[in-house]
Image (tube, rainbow, N blue to C red):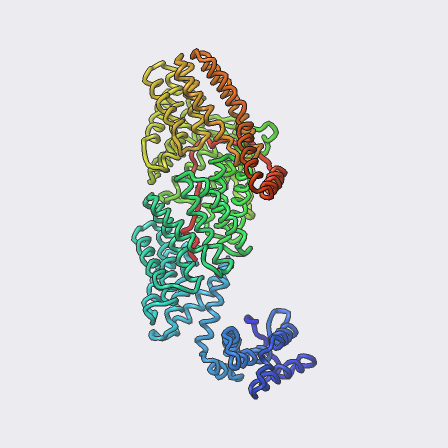
C-alpha cells in the first residue's frame, strides 16, 4: 500500500466516505478499539489482515492512490497488532504507513502513533529509503536508483553522528552509490561509495556481530568494484582482509555466513586472475562450496552463491582439464539461472557465465548440444543486458561472448552441406558482435587486447569458410551495422574488402596490447595462423617467416595454463616450419616441424582434437620426408587418440561425426606400417581404428552386465535413462576452433552482492 496517498473528504479519525467503505472503515476501527480494550483476538487473527486488505483494494483509486483515512486505519490496526502480539512485521508495516501520513495529514497524529511502537519519523524515512534500495537492486530503471540515493542521502544527513542506526544507514547509501557507479560508470560515485562504506564500519557501535560484518561485506563490494574498474591491487588486498575479518565474526544467520563465503569466493577468483596461482583458485572453490552449503538461503542469495562457485569451477577446469569440475560448473550455473528472478539485473551476468562454461565444455569434448545451449544463453544474456540498459562497458562483455560462440558454431556449420545459410548468419553475427564490443572498449582498457583478437578471428572465419566474398586487399575492415535493442545482430551484406589483412593487423594490435603472458601466447598463435593463411593466398615469404617467429614465441614452455593450449600452439609452429620446408627443403625446418608436432601430440592437458591434429601431421610429414618408422610412430599416436576424441560421454551422433572427420587415420596408419615393413601392425591399426565405438560398447556392456548381476533394478533404470537420452540426442560435426579466442566471462567478482 505504500506509494501515493489520496486525501478523503474528512481526515479526522475514520473519515466519512460513502456507502460500503464507510461501514468497512468503521469495522476496522471497531477492531482496533476492541483490541485496546483487551479483546486481542479482534486484531491478531488472519481474518483481521484479510479484512484490512479488502478495504485497501476497495478504496484504491485508478491512479493507485489510497485514501489517507484507509492508510490511517490500517496503520492503527498494524500498530495495535504489534503492541499485543509483538510481531516485528506488523511494527515495520505500521512505521511505513504512519511515515507516509506525516507530510500529508499531520493532524492524524502519526508521530504519536510512531512513538507508541518505539519509532520516530526519521526511523520511518530510513525504512522507506531501504525499501527504495531494495527496489533498485532488482530494477534496472535509473529513476528507481536515483530515488533510492536521494532518500538515503537525506536520511544520513538527518541522522546524528552518535546515533546507533548511523552505520546501517551509511552502509545502505554506500550500496546505492556503488550500484550507480556500476550501472552508469561514475568514478566519483565509486570513490564516494568506498568512503561512505568505510565510514559505516567506523560508525558501528558494537565491536563485533552481524551489523559490523554486514558493513564490512559492503565495504568489500565497493573495493572490489573499484579494483575491477581500475586494477589497483591495493583495493583487492584490502577487500580480502575486510572479508576475512567479517567472516571471523559471523556464525549466523546462515544468509550472512553465505554472503561472506560467496564474497570470499569472488575475491579469491579475482586474486587468481591477478596471480595465476592454482592455490587462489582452489580457495575460491572452497569458499563457494561453503556458501552454497548454507541452509535457508533466499533464491537470490543462493543464485549469487551458485554463480560464483560455478565460475570458479569453470576457471579451474581451463587450468586442469578436470571433467568433474566443468560438469559441476555447468550444473551449478544452470541452477543459478533457474533461481534468478526474471527482472533481476544480475540475470544477464549469470546467463553469460553459464554460456562461457558451456563453451568451455564444448571446446574440450565437442558435444554440439553444449554449443547450441551456449549460444542460447549468450543471446539471452545480451538481450537482458540491453533491455535493462546496462552500461556500454558491461554490455561489451556480452557482445564478446556471443561473438565467440557464434564464430565457433559458424565454423562448425560451414562444414555441413545443408547448413551454409546458418553458417553465414552465425559468422556475420560474430563479426557484428565483435565489432560492437571493440567499439565500446577504449585504447588502454584491459579488455581491449582480447576484443581485438576476437574481431580478428571473426573476420578470419568468414574468409576461411569461403563466406567473405571478394577481397580486393585494400586493408579496410568491413562496415558493421548496429544490433537491435533485443540483442539480435543484423546481417553484414557487403563484401570482405581486406578481411584477412584487417584480421592480421588487429591480431598484431592484440599481441602489442596484451599484458597477461598466457593470453599473449594465444594471440601469438592466432597471429601465426593468420599469417600462414595469408602466405597460402599470396605466397609472401615474409608472412611465413613472421608466422614461424610468432608461433615459436607462443610455444615457449610455461605453466599448466600453457599446457592446455600447447597442442594448438605447437600445431601452428609445426605447420609453419613444414610449409617452409616444403618450399626450401632446409633440414632445420623439417627437424623443427617434427619436434613441435611430437611435443604437441604428447601435451596431456591439451584438447584431444589438437593433439590428434599434431599426431596426424607428424605422421604425414615424416611420410613425405621418407622416414617411415617415424611416420608409423606418428600415426600410432593418432590412432590411440581416436577413442578419447569420441569418448562415451558425448552423444552418439557427436561420436560418430568426430570419428568420420578422422576416418583416414586408420588407413593412413596401416599404409605407414606397410611401408615400414610391419604388416602385422598394419592389420592391428586398421582394426583399432575400425572398432572404436564397438570397443566402447563392448566395455560398457561388460560393465552393465556386472551391474545387472549385482543390482538388476538399477541396471533396468540405467537402460531407461540411456533410452531417454538416445531419444533426445542431436549433434553436429565437432571441430576445434581455428585459434585461441578470448572467452570473456565476468565471473564471480561481479556476484558479490
Near-viewer residue (86 or 537)? 86
**Residue 414 visible in rendering:** no
Near-viewer residue (98 or 692)? 692
Quarter the N terminus occupies = bottom right
Q: Position of residue 609 (x, y in %)?
A: 46, 29
**Residue 115 visible in rendering:** yes
| Most distant residue in the left direction | 234
- Residue drawn at x 51%, y 52% is 347
Near-viewer residue (190 or 233)? 233
- Residue drawn at x 66%, y 74% is 58
Q: Position of residue 726 (x, y in %)?
A: 61, 37
Task: Give the image quarter of residue 277.
Answer: top left
- Residue drawn at x 53%, y 83% is 108
Quarter the C terminus occupies = bottom left
Say whether residue 623 is left or right of residue 106: left
Residue 222 vertical placement versus 6 (above, below): above
Residue 376 vertical placement versus 478 (above, below): below
| Most distant residue in the front direction | 709
Q: Position of residue 580 (x, y in %)?
A: 37, 18
Residue 308 vertical placement versus 693 (above, below): below
Q: Position of residue 200 (x, y in %)?
A: 35, 66
Say whether residue 201 is left or right of residue 48: left
| Most distant residue in the bottom direction | 37
Q: How many marks?
A: 0
Amino acid at each position: 500500500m505504500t506509494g501515493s496517498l489520496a486525501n478523503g473528504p474528512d481526515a479526522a479519525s475514520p473519515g466519512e466516505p460513502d456507502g460500503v467503505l464507510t461501514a468497512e472503515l468503521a469495522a476496522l476501527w471497531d477492531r482496533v478499539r476492541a483490541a485496546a480494550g483487551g479483546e486481542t483476538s479482534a486484531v491478531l487473527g488472519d481474518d483481521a489482515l484479510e479484512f484490512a486488505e479488502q478495504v485497501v483494494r476497495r478504496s484504491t483509486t485508478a491512479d493507485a492512490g489510497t485514501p489517507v483515512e484507509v492508510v490511517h486505519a490500517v496503520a492503527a490496526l498494524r500498530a495495535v497488532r504489534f503492541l499485543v502480539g509483538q510481531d516485528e512485521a506488523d511494527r515495520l508495516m505500521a512505521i511505513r504507513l504512519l511515515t507516509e501520513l506525516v507530510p500529508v495529514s499531520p493532524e492524524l497524529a502519526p508521530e504519536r502513533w510512531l512513538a507508541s511502537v518505539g519509532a520516530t519519523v526519521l526511523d520511518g524515512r530510513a525504512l522507506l529509503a531501504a525499501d527504495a534500495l531494495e527496489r533498485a537492486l532488482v530494477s534496472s530503471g535509473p529513476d528507481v536508483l536515483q530515488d533510492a540515493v536521494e532518500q538515503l542521502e537525506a536520511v544520513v544527513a538527518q541522522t546524528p553522528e552518535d546515533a546507533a542506526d548511523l552505520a546501517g544507514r551509511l552502509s545502505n547509501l554506500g550500496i546505492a552509490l556503488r550500484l550507480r557507479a556500476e550501472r552508469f560508470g561514475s568514478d566519483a560515485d565509486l570513490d564516494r561509495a568506498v568512503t561512505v562504506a568505510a565510514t559505516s564500519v567506523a560508525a558501528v557501535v558494537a565491536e563485533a556481530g552481524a551489523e559490523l560484518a554486514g558493513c564490512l561485506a559492503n565495504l568489500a563490494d565497493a573495493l572490489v568494484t573499484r579494483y575491477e574498474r581500475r586494477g589497483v591491487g591495493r583495493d583487492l588486498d584490502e577487500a580480502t582482509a575486510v572479508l576475512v575479518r567479517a567472516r571471523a565474526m559471523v556464525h549466523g544467520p546462515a544468509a550472512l555466513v553465505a554472503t561472506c563465503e560467496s564474497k570470499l569466493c569472488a575475491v579469491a577468483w579475482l586474486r587468481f586472475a591477478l596471480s595465476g596461482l592454482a592455490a587462489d583458485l582452489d580457495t575460491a572453490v572452497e569458499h563457494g562450496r561453503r556458501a552454497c552449503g548454507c541452509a535457508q538461503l533466499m533464491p537470490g542469495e543462493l543464485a549469487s552463491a551458485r554463480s560464483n562457485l560455478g565460475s570458479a569451477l569453470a576457471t579451474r577446469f581451463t587450468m586442469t582439464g578436470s571433467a568433474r569440475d566443468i560438469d559441476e560448473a555447468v550444473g551449478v550455473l544452470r541452477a543459478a539461472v533457474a533461481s534468478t528472478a526474471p527482472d533481476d539485473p544480475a540475470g544477464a551476468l549469470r546467463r553469460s557465465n553459464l554460456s562461457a562454461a558451456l563453451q568451455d565444455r564444448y571446446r574440450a569434448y565437442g558435444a554440439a548440444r553444449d554449443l547450441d545451449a551456449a549460444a542460447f544463453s549468450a543471446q539471452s544474456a545480451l538481450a537482458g543486458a540491453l533491455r535493462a540498459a546496462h552500461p556500454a562497458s558491461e554490455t561489451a562483455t556480452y557482445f564478446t561472448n556471443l561473438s565467440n560462440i557464434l564464430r565457433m558454431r559458424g565454423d562448425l556449420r560451414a562444414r555441413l552441406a545443408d547448413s551454409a545459410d546458418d553458417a553465414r548468419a552465425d559468422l556475420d553475427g560474430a563479426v557484428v558482435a565483435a565489432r560492437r564490443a571493440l567499439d565500446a572498449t577504449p585504447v588502454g582498457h584491459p579488455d581491449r587486447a582480447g576484443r581485438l583478437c576476437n574481431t580478428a578471428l571473426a573476420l578470419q572465419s568468414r574468409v576461411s569458410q569461403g563466406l567473405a566474398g571478394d577481397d580486393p586487399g585494400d586493408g579496410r575492415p568491413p562496415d558493421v551495422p548496429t544490433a537491435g535493442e533485443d540483442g539480435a545482430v543484423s546481417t553484414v551484406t557487403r563484401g570482405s574488402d581486406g578481411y584477412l589483412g584487417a584480421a592480421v593487423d588487429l591480431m598484431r594490435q592484440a599481441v602489442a596490447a596484451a599484458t597477461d603472458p598466457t593470453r599473449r601466447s594465444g594471440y601469438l598463435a592466432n597471429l601465426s595462423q593468420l599469417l600462414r593463411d595469408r602466405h597460402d593466398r599470396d605466397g609472401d615469404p615474409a608472412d611465413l617467416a613472421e608466422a614461424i617467429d610468432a608461433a615459436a614465441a607462443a610455444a615457449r614452455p610455461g605453466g599448466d595454463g600453457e599446457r592446455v593450449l600447447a597442442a594448438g600452439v605447437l600445431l601452428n609452429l609445426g605447420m609453419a616450419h613444414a610449409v617452409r620446408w616444403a618450399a626450401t627443403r632446409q633440414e632445420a625446418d623439417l627437424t623443427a616441424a617434427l619436434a613441435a608436432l611430437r611435443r604437441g601430440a604428447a601435451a596431456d592437458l591439451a584438447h584431444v582434437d589438437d593433439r590428434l591434429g599434431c599426431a596426424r601431421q607428424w605422421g604425414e610429414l615424416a611420410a613425405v620426408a621418407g622416414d617411415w618408422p617415424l611416420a608409423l610412430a606418428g600415426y600410432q599416436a593418432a590412432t590411440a587418440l581416436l577413442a578419447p576424441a569420441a569418448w562415451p560421454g558425448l552423444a552418439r551422433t557427436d561420436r560418430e561425426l568426430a570419428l568420420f572427420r578422422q576416418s583416414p587415420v586408420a588407413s593412413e596408419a596401416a599404409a605407414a606400417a606397410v611401408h615400414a615393413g610391419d604388416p602385422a601392425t598394419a592389420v592391428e591399426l586398421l582394426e583399432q581404428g575400425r572398432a572404436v565405438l564397438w570397443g566402447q560398447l563392448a566395455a560398457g556392456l561388460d560393465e552393465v552386465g556386472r551391474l545387472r548381476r549385482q543390482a538388476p533394478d538399477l541396471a533396468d533404470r540405467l537402460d531407461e535413462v540411456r533410452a531417454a537420452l538416445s531419444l533426445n540426442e542431436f549433434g553436429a560435426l565437432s571441430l576445434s576452433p581455428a585459434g585461441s579466442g578470448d572467452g570473456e566471462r565476468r565471473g564471480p567478482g561481479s556476484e558479490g552482492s
